[in-house]
Amino acid sequence: MSIENGDFAGGVAVITGAAAGIGEGLARRAGALGMKVVVADISGEGAEAVAQDLRDQGGEALAVRVDVSRPEELDRLAAEVHARFGDVRLLVNNAGIETLGLTWEIPAERWERTLDVNIHGVVHGVRAFAPRMLASGQPACIANLASVGSFGVMPTQTAYIMSKHAIQSFSECLYLEIQMTGKPIQVSTIVPGMVKTRIFEASAGAGEPEGAARHRAVMRDLMASYGMDLDAACRIIFDKLMTGVFWIDTQPDMTREMIDGRIAFLTQRAEPQLAPVARSILGLDN
Ligand SMILES: NC(=O)c1ccc[n+]([C@@H]2O[C@H](COP(=O)([O-])OP(=O)(O)OC[C@H]3O[C@@H](n4cnc5c(N)ncnc54)[C@H](O)[C@@H]3O)[C@@H](O)[C@H]2O)c1
């Protein structure tokens, strides 16, 4: 199923985690296309700033404070958006957090928070919005944020990596479930490589074990040096979304390399092995 440009223009876009980073970039692309944009984020202030900016540019935008780790808040968001704007054309389950540290050193609260935001936030976003999207019979798109990390492994990023593996398989199953309904809803997996955002900022690491700070700083610096420009990445994501494809990646070479590595690992039933670049990120060669 293909969502054409014209199908998006004038429609309603709901984007979680839209006060910053990739979510904000996608909200701005949606606004530029003339969509009505619901900027949903745990930071109500941040969401309002983005929504106000979109309104200042002549668009229609609504900020809603939502913690995606709470299913009832997503239910409330879906009901509010439907009552105010009607059918939703585009849902992007984008909100996500990174957690660094050794599995046994990460406090239980941080573990649960990571899985609740990254996995349950996406699952319950779909559960809250899909019934009305299906009932409307209108073309629509649901896109979930996976990662190139969905196809690899990285010690001390275990919580994040397993959550992204989960979202990739969730989106594949969801695609087939929607296909079973015969309704015109496109499901897409968004697979960013490394994109310049604030996901590795020190302040986002509250609750991580002490040892994680060095790794977080290395990742932040790597992102600043090698990450893709945020606006460029969001243009690629949005353009691909409008072609109605399942796979939406920002850096196809990186995706291919990760998937090829995964296929080789599984085919050979190999022992898990650290790539040289991962050894250096973790400071194991010092
Ligand atoms: N930046 C990258 O290189 C990259 C790569 C692969 C995947 N991703 C994925 O893209 C998504 C966005 O990441 P980003 O890099 O833009 O991060 P970011 O930290 O820059 O922005 C994340 C946004 O989500 C919001 N948020 C966090 N917890 C929330 C919650 N419980 N409820 C609602 N909103 C919440 C934050 O307030 C923030 O506005 C994530 O799912 C991430 O895993 C990012």
Image (cartoon, rainbow, N blue to C red):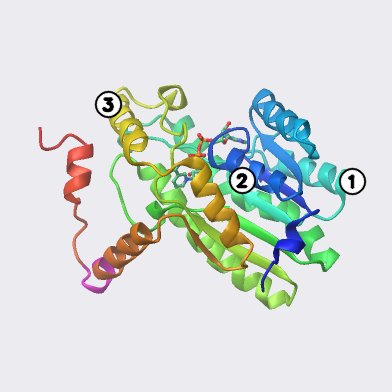
Mark 2 / mark 3, whichever is N-terminal: 2
Q: Which mark is residue 26?
A: 2
Q: Which mark is residue 38?
A: none
| Disc 2 and disc 3 in contact, CB within 8 angstroms | no
Residue 268, magenta (yes or no): yes
| Disc 3 and disc 1 in contact, CB within 8 angstroms | no
Toward the left, the furthest residue is 286
Q: Position of residue 93 (x, y in %)?
A: 61, 49
Please give the residue where the numbered disc 3 appears in the rendered image.
214
Q: Is residue 263 left or right of residue 198?
A: left
Q: Amino acid at mark 2?
A: Leu
**Disc 2 on helix, strand or loop?**
helix
* Cα–Cα span, label 1 and label 2: 23 Å
**Disc 1 on helix, strand or loop?**
helix
Q: Which mark is residue 83?
A: 1
Judge depth for marks 2 and 3 and give the one in front: 2
Mark 1 / mark 2, whichever is N-terminal: 2
Toward the front, the furthest residue is 57
| Disc 1 and disc 2 in contact, CB within 8 angstroms | no
Q: Amino acid at mark 3?
A: Arg
Residue at the (26%, 74%) spot, across then down: 267
Q: Position of residue 189 (x, y in %)?
A: 53, 60
Q: Position of residue 232 (x, y in %)?
A: 50, 47
* Cα–Cα span, label 3 and label 1: 47 Å
Q: What residue span does the magenta drawing correspond to?
A: 265-269
| Mark 2 Cβ inside 8 Å of ligand 1 | no
